[in-house]
Image: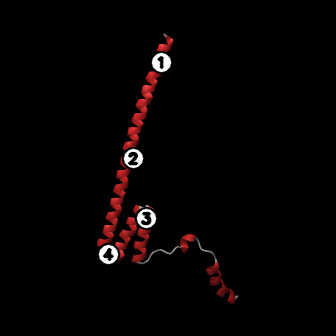
Amino acid sequence: MATLKYYIPLLLLLLPRPAAAQAQPCRDCPCIIARGEQLAEKGDYVNAIRQYNAAKECAPQRTAELNRRIEALFRQIEGLRQEAVAERDRAEKALARVEAAERKAKAEAERASAEAQR
């Protein structure tokens, strides 16, 4: 029975762990900053900014650099917003043209129908 006491911890080490438990959290600033860069590249700007803000806590001497990175992300977000607004405006204009053409075609069809009935 005493030997079983020694095997239980070994068996626990051999059991598969969930994937979340295997992923090592960042515990140092370079890792946190690198994770922020990865998230920014993927377009996950909110979490990238969170990582950069967390890095400011562990490396206050890099606050200015991290603030520049955050500002760059905000500029990217603003650029994307402006592109989306421009696309929306183009879509609204195209819709207006289609609706006008539809009204014109309907009016012509009604006029042709009226002439055919004469």
Residue at which label 3 appears = 41
Circle 1 residues within 10 Å: few <14, some 14–19, many ≥20: few
Amino acid at circle 4: Arg
The numbered mark, 4 or 1, whose residue comes first in the sequence reads: 4
Q: Where is residue 84 in the image (x, y as percent from the top left)?
A: 38, 49
The numbered mark, 3 or 2, whose residue comes first in the sequence reads: 3
Give the Cα separation between the discs numbered 4 and 1. Answer: 75 Å
Q: Quick check: 28 above or below 53?
A: below
Residue at image position (55%, 74%) is 22
Q: Quick check: 110 above or below 59?
A: above
Residue at image position (47%, 14%) is 115
Looking at the image, do the residues carrying marks 3 and 4 touch, with CB atoms under 8 Å apart? no
The numbered mark, 4 or 2, whose residue comes first in the sequence reads: 4
Circle 3 residues within 10 Å: few <14, some 14–19, many ≥20: few
Residue at which label 1 appears = 112
Please tell me whether mark 4 sits on a helix, a strand or a loop. helix
Give the Cα separation between the discs numbered 4 and 2. Answer: 38 Å
In the visual, does 1 lie left or right of 49? right
Circle 4 residues within 10 Å: few <14, some 14–19, many ≥20: some
Per the rendering, the mark at residue 94 is none
Looking at the image, do the residues carrying marks 4 and 2 touch, with CB atoms under 8 Å apart? no
Q: Where is residue 4 in the image (x, y as percent from the top left)?
A: 68, 86
